[in-house]
Every structure is written in C-alpha cells, then in structure tokens.
Image: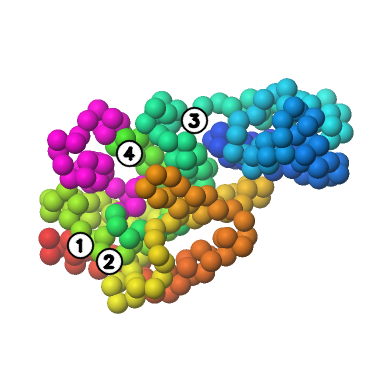
Amino acid sequence: MTQSRTGGADQNSGTPTARRMVLGAQLRRLRERAGVSRADAGFHIRGSESKISRMELGRVGFKERDIDDLMTLYGLSDPRERDEYLQMVKDSNEPGWWYRYHDLLPTWFTNYVGLEESASRIQTFELQFIPGLLQTEDYARAVASRGRPEFITEDVERRIALRMRRQKVLTRPNAPRLWAFIDEAVLHRPVGGHAVMKKQLDALLEWMTMPHIAVQVLPYARSSHVAEGAFSVLRFAEPELPDIVYIEYLTGAVYLDKPDDLEPYARVIDQLAVDAETPDHSRAFIEKVRNEI
C-alpha cells in the first residue's frame, strides 16, 4: 500500500461505513496475495471464516489487535504501511453524525445512511412516496405519522429531523448526483393533504433546478412492467467499492453488491430512463399536477 492509495481512499471515503468497506477490500487483497484462506485467517484471529468474510465486506467494526495479527499473517512488515492500516481502523470506528439517532435507527438502516453519505451517485425508483432526500418537513411528518396527528411523538419528530439532516448531502460541496424516477401515482397521492402536497411539489420543482439532481416521472401508461418495487442504487468514487442496490421492506432491508445481482437492476434503470418522461417534460408534468391541486 502506498501513501497515495491509502490516503486517497481514506480521504475520499467520508463516512465510517465507506471506510470500513475500503479497508475490508484492501484486507481481502492482502489475504489473496498471501494465499491465505478465509478459514485460516479466521482461526489466526480467534474467529471464524464468516467473521473474515464480514470484515472484508466492511459489515462489521474492526479491532486493532485483529488487523495487526492479520497484517503479520499476510506478510505485511513495513512499519509505515502497518501504521496506515491501523489509522484506517481508527477512522472507520469513528461514529458518524447520525450516531445521535442510533436509538431510533435499526442496524439495517444505519448502514444505509452511512453509504448514502459516501455515494457519488444515487439512483432511486419510488412507487409510493416522494424520495426521502427530496421530501419537505411537513410531507415527511405526514409519512412518518401515517397522516394521523395523534401519532406524532418525540421519536417521530426526531426521525423527521434525521431525514432533514440527510438532505444536507445534496447541498454540500461535491454533492452526489441524484437521479430519481417517480411513478406518476406518487404525484397524485395527497400525502398530508392538498396544502402539504402542493408545497412538496413546489419543493420538488426547486430541487430539480440544481444541476446534479434529475427527476423523471414514469407515467401510468408505461409503469406496469418496469419494476416490482422501490429500490436505490448507490455508486461510489472509490474503485474498491462496488455498486450497491438497497431494497427496503417492512421489517428490514437487503443490500446487493454481487455483479449477478446488480445486473438486473442496471437493466431496470436503463429501461426507466427510456420509459419515463425526460427531465424537462417531467418538470412540465409536475407543474401541471401542482396547478391542478
């Protein structure tokens, strides 16, 4: 590992989640270069093959002792390189800003927030709601409370605050490119009532003026066979990190990163780009719906 490779990856990977993934990918390369099996590596650190697999995928935290032992096993003896790896361990274990919401967030969503913060491009397809990163506070409150004011609690308000905080990723320097596909039904579903929906569509139109945000509306006539449900695809600037497909369901989420799993979603994105209205036509479409409310 050279200074430019380690420093560059660490500098660009702005969240603990991405740092763990980068470090895990580099550990995998070291292990493969040394010709060590996952089972042998796991035994060496008093763990298991599955533990090494989770470490190399960046899905668990790292202990300095484990990484130090693995570097020895893999034949990495240069003190400077070893220090760089151990610094990456420390960086990857630093809590993200969302840690203060940890009591509200299930583990499967905590990982997504970290990945979202690190992505260079986010592609998302929504069938039911305006994408979370583009929601207004009132719209988000209506979604979180299921339109029932009596359901609004302190925890609900904190979830809304978290969603609003997540939006800062779109206004920071070097913001990721967001490419959102929205089924037409989303625009006609008056979440929170007509006044809330009208302000939400105004906000959506405002977001669409930003050069790194593209929104395309999928009209009813072309929305029947594109995808079975909502999903997001995240891409990262770091070459060590694969694209990730995120699919959320009622009690959890699925993360896909293997090429065979990613390919169908890439094809769906390509089809959505063709079937949906262009960004300019989508703007006119949204304006028409907004004016009819």
The residue tagged with tag 4: helix, strand or loop? Answer: helix
Kind of element beneath mark 2? helix
Q: CA distance from mark 2 to mark 1?
A: 7 Å
Please tell me which residue lies in front, 88 or 36. Answer: 36
Determine which residue is flagged by label 2.
Answer: 184
- Cα gap from disc 2 to disc 4, whole angstroms: 24 Å
User: 181 left or right of 84?
Assistant: left
Label 3 secondary element: loop
Q: Main secondary structure of the magenta part?
A: helix
In this picture, which residue range is highlighted in magenta? Answer: 130-158
Residue kind at label 4, given as amino acid type: Met
Which amino acid is tagged 3?
A: Gly
The label shown at residue 164 is 4
Q: Identify the amino acid type marked 1.
A: His
Residue 125, horizontal then vertical, whole percent: 39, 60
149 in magenta? yes
| Tags 2 and 1 touching, CB below 8 Å | yes
Q: Are marks 2 and 4 in contact (CB under 8 Å)?
A: no
Whichever of callouts 2 and 3 sits on the residue coming sooner in the sequence is 3
Q: Is residue 14 magenta?
A: no
Q: Quadrant of residue 82?
A: top right
Q: Residue at x 16, y 42 (%)?
A: 148
Report how far apart the C-alphas of labels 3 and 4 lie in the structure.
Answer: 16 Å
